[in-house]
Image (cartoon, helix red, strand yellow):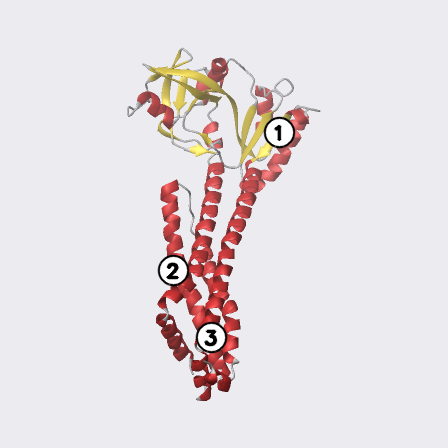
Amino acid sequence: MGILQSIKMALKSIKGNKLRSVLTMLGMIIGVSSVIVLVSIAQGSSKSVTSQINSLGTNLLTVSSLDATSVSFTEDKISELSKVDGVKEVAPVVSGRANVKKDRTTSQVSVTGTNAAYSSVRDTQVSSGRFITDLDVEYRQKVAVIGSSTATTFFGTEDPVGQYLQIDGTSYKVVGVLVSKGSSMGQGGDNTIIVPLSTGQRLIGSTTISTVYLQGESEDQMDAVMNLVETKMASLFPGQSDSYSVTNQQDVMDTMSSVTDTMTLMLGGIASISLLVGGIGIMNIMLVSVSERTKEIGIRKAIGAKRRDVLVQFLIEAVMLSGVGGLIGIISGLGIGKLVSSLFSLSVSFSSSVILFSFLFSLVVGVVFGVFPANKASTLNPIQALRYE
């Protein structure tokens, strides 16, 4: 008997017991859809975290003072850091919070004092107007670049560029509005005001610079640049290695990727258990089917069917149950994933490799758990099978 005939007989058997077939496939449907949904959520979270880290800036090194009394970045020391091989841009920052007022609207906003290089170092762009310039820093200009949320809070739908804000009682001219970055690493990045470094030091009431951002020329050289920066810091602040830190954005990204990869594997493994449970369900139903069709098997063997024919027929039936269940599981998994994404505002990333793997895995489960019932059917003695009641 050919494969095509075996497939037709398997389909006939499945159609003859529709309810039982649907219940049998249910394990595969739940298993495949669970794998797709859970892994897609994990991968979406991983991409979201990577995107948030990248939004902080590209090829970024952060040099931070942990003890302002021991390590303070003066203009000369910042200049020395800018001369390190592989360093493209340097952006010192001072930060704090200030009371901001416009007409009757008052709010506390995060204030950052920095230079013109901050725009490229932290990948910060303006949607209208301009960013801080070196002349603004040099002449202590009272100008400000505001975040999109700050612009909405104080100006509504009006264009803020050219208008004024009262920051801690002093009038500042708005020269630019930042492109929205949304929430980054759990912190909102749009409710902010950026002013020239010199102006920011006066506004915050401190000349101490405790953080300097460095941008590397090439992503491939970041480890080497980090080593050179650490060496330079050791020479600038001898014996104070415990009072400052040098962190590489790539290290943070690698750590987060490792965590999310582990989470993806764990979720995928948990979901795969339901596939195995579905496989056991298929084996149980196929064993019942063998018992119910014992006489049929005896008749087929009596008229010349070989052991291989019976084995292939039952094996194909098991694979078709798991395969059809897998296909329905893929469709339901994609639908549930999109539904979860829209209802709970989760980042979901579907992967064709995960979908293909879950489907192939369901087929393998069908083969593995279908072998035993198929083998049992193929080894039945035709005489005893014909006598079976």
Q: Nearer the viewer, residue 156 or 230?
A: 156
**Which of pointers 3 and 1 indicates the residue nearer the eye?**
3
Could you give the CA–CA distance between mark 3 and mark 2, rounded to whole angstroms? 26 Å
Identify whether 126 is placed above or below 174: below
Dot 3 corresponds to which residue? 290
Q: How crowded is mark 3: few (under 14 residues within 10 Å), some or many (20 or more)?
A: many
The first of marks 3 and 1 along the sequence is: 1
Q: Nearer the viewer, residue 246 or 381?
A: 381
Q: Can residue 112 be seen in this view?
A: yes
**Which of pointers 2 and 1 indicates the residue nearer the eye?**
2
The first of marks 3 and 2 along the sequence is: 3
The amino acid at mark 2 is: Ile
The first of marks 2 and 1 along the sequence is: 1
Viewport quadrant of the C terminus:
bottom left
Could you give the CA–CA distance between mark 2 and mark 1, rounded to whole angstroms? 53 Å
Q: Which of 285 and 251 is in front in this view?
A: 285
Rendered location of residue 76, percent (x, y): 59, 20
Dot 1 corresponds to which residue? 245
The amino acid at mark 1 is: Ser
Q: Which residue is drawn at 51% across and 49% down?
A: 267
Which residue in the rendered view is the most extreme toward the top?
Answer: 169
Q: Do the residues labelled 3 and 2 touch (CB within 8 Å)?
A: no
Identify whether 74 is placed above or below 318: above
Q: Which of 148 and 326 is in front in this view?
A: 326
Q: In which quarter of the image is residue 218?
A: top right
Identify whether 293 is placed above or below 340: below
Dot 2 corresponds to which residue? 328
Which residue in the rendered view is the most extreme toward the right?
Answer: 239
Indicate the secondary structure of the residue bearing disc 1.
strand
Q: Can residue 216 be seen in this view?
A: no
